[in-house]
Image (spheres, rainbow, N blue to C red):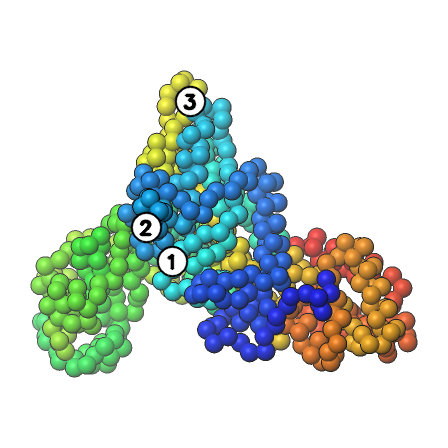
Amino acid sequence: MRYSQYFLPTLKETPGDAEVVSHQLMSRAGMIRKVAAGIYDYLPLGLRVIRKAENIVREEMNKAGAIEILMPAVCPADLWEQSGRWQQYGKELLRLKDRKETEFCIGPTHEEVVTEIVRGTVNSYRQLPVNLYQIQTKFRDEVRPRFGLMRGREFIMKDAYSFDATDEGANLSYEKMRKAYCRIFERCGLKYRMVEADSGAIGGSFSHEFMVLADTGEDVVISCESCEYSANIEKAVVIDKGEMSQAPMNEVERVVTKGAHSVADVSVMLELKPSQIVKTMLVIVDDEPVAVLIRGDHELNVAKVKNLLGASVVELATPEQIAKATGGPVGFSGPIGLKITLYADNAVKYMRNMGVGGNEKDIHLEGVNLERDFQVKQFADLRDAADGDTCPHCGGRYSNTRGIEVGHIFKLGTKYSESMKATFLDADGVAKEIIMGCYGIGIGRTAAAAIEQNHDENGIIWPMPLAPFQVIVTMLNPKDEEVLAAGEKLYQDLLSEGIEVLLDDRDERPGSKFKDADLLGIPLRINVGARGLKEQSFELQERRAGERVMLPIEGAAQKVAEQVRTALAAE
Ligand code: ATP
Ligand code: MG
């Protein structure tokens, strides 16, 4: 591709709303353009990267025995009614009506549609297993679309769905996908981790997420320093085995805590450590208020509450809901005298003489004790794991890092086949529900995650497998006929070697060409200049290492092509 004839609108300025590096660099490198919140154009350079990622995904899915199909973006509400998700999915589901007032949604995921395909075509165990996948545009009306392609509203996903006759078969299908995912992210040249995950709104029995490790990641990954255990913080198991404190119980005392807004404020005013204070968190569980007690130095884990109570929606209560349930304002809730059900995190069990809210403005209580002063319906693991907690598997130490969830695999079981009546006849002619799995990869998010992991202050540093072009040939002064001729020849030679080349033939200062090349992040750059030509050579520069080496003109294209192939094979 010739730069002068390409459509590559790079920007000098970073768009104001671009908070993370990948969003900034994708915009500046002319890869994407915002059309509306969370909705983007993929410009040519961006599209090339998307296609690279898609192709790696497609090849590995095909190798793993999955079969490509394409389902519609607009899906009939009727199918969603059958699975029950028309009611459950909430506002992320974009709903619309056609001219006949029939309801539809724009698919945020396709379990319903694919189950309908299989239900209508499979009736015998002989037709199973089958795994169908697509690479397609999804829409989720995210509350906070941000970070460019990382959390869009419209985004490209690869979604696969497996259908099996037996539980062992379903586990095998899951295992095949797990391995394919590992190969995909290795081939993309990314540092990633597979972690145990919560099954969330999609439901099902177990699931794993694939996390690209990056400080800007929205997810927290808990990993044991001594064994292989790694889990999303939503899921990471915490064991709080304490010793019951033998300290004598004090009398309950009211303390004025005027204007105290945080555990830190209360801790100063009560002269107690945060670990001696209990936060009473009000949550709304499927429309019912419930209180959850968490130690002051711990964080509530909403996903764990949701799983414990088998709820579909759990949300933190609003100030109005808190006032209604406790009689006091936000920040002053406490367990004594509450009329709603109380649950508590395990760590609370071992506390003595705790500090709690007084359910009254500017009042806290201290010297409060379990059983004597209030009762809890159930203790459970309801908090986030933290750095330094103990691994339940080996007793090792937890540490946390941040990650970007690029892929998620679920064993669904019969959740959809049951509600949508997708059955088959087994060898004995008995009708059984099909056992399903579903497996997603965010294509745009993967490309963005690659940038989060691979960049410097000058721009992107593409891993070779995702690079929009593998080589950029920069003609320092294309007006010089010798430079032009040598550059053109090198370009043609590289093309004949099957290399993807961008030829910078623009009439610009070398300095600004170098800046653009650094921004675009093409892994190998060859500078063609008059000085080098006198010595029968070009200059070769790796984007990552930065240093320039002489490249003899003789055999240059073959040598560079070899380097590209080696880099691709290494991933
Ligand atoms: P998240 O927790 O980040 O919202 P999710 O758990 O809702 O993700 P899944 O339903 O598992 O995501 O979707 C499969 C994959 O699709 C995710 O692993 C991610 O790579 C991608 N994905 C999900 N939501 C978005 C989005 N809003 N923008 C871009 N990619 C997304
Ligand atoms: Mg989501």
* Precedes in sequence: disc 3 or disc 2: 2
C-alpha distance separating marks 1 and 2:
11 Å
The image shows residue 280 at horizontal and vertical percentages of 20, 65
Picture quadrant of ligand 1: bottom left
Is 115 on the left-hand or right-hand side of 281? right
The image shows residue 222 at horizontal and vertical percentages of 43, 60
Q: Against 327, is 110 above or below?
A: above
Q: Please name the amino acid that badge 3 sits on.
A: Asp
Residue bearing mark 1: 141
Instruction: Residue at 26% x, 69% y: name it.
Output: 296
- Tell me whether circle 3 and circle 1 mark residues in contact (CB < 8 Å): no
Q: Please name the amino acid that badge 2 sits on.
A: Tyr
Instruction: Residue at 19% x, 81% y: name it.
Output: 259
Q: Against 95, is 32 above or below?
A: below
* Precedes in sequence: disc 3 or disc 1: 1
Q: In which quarter of the image is residue 293?
A: bottom left
Q: Is mark 2 on a helix, strand or loop?
A: loop
Q: Please name the amino acid that badge 1 sits on.
A: Asp
Instruction: Residue at 62% x, 61% y: name it.
Output: 44
Residue bearing mark 3: 426
Residue bearing mark 2: 89
Q: Which residue lies furthest to the front in this view?
A: 99
The image shows residue 199 at horizontal and vertical percentages of 38, 49
For the residue pair 51 and 172, the one nearer the viewer reads as: 51
The image shows residue 229 at horizontal and vertical percentages of 45, 53
Q: Within 10 angstroms of label 1, few (less than 14), some, or many (20 or more) residues?
A: some
Q: What element carries label 3?
A: loop
User: Is residue 544 visible to us here?
Assistant: yes
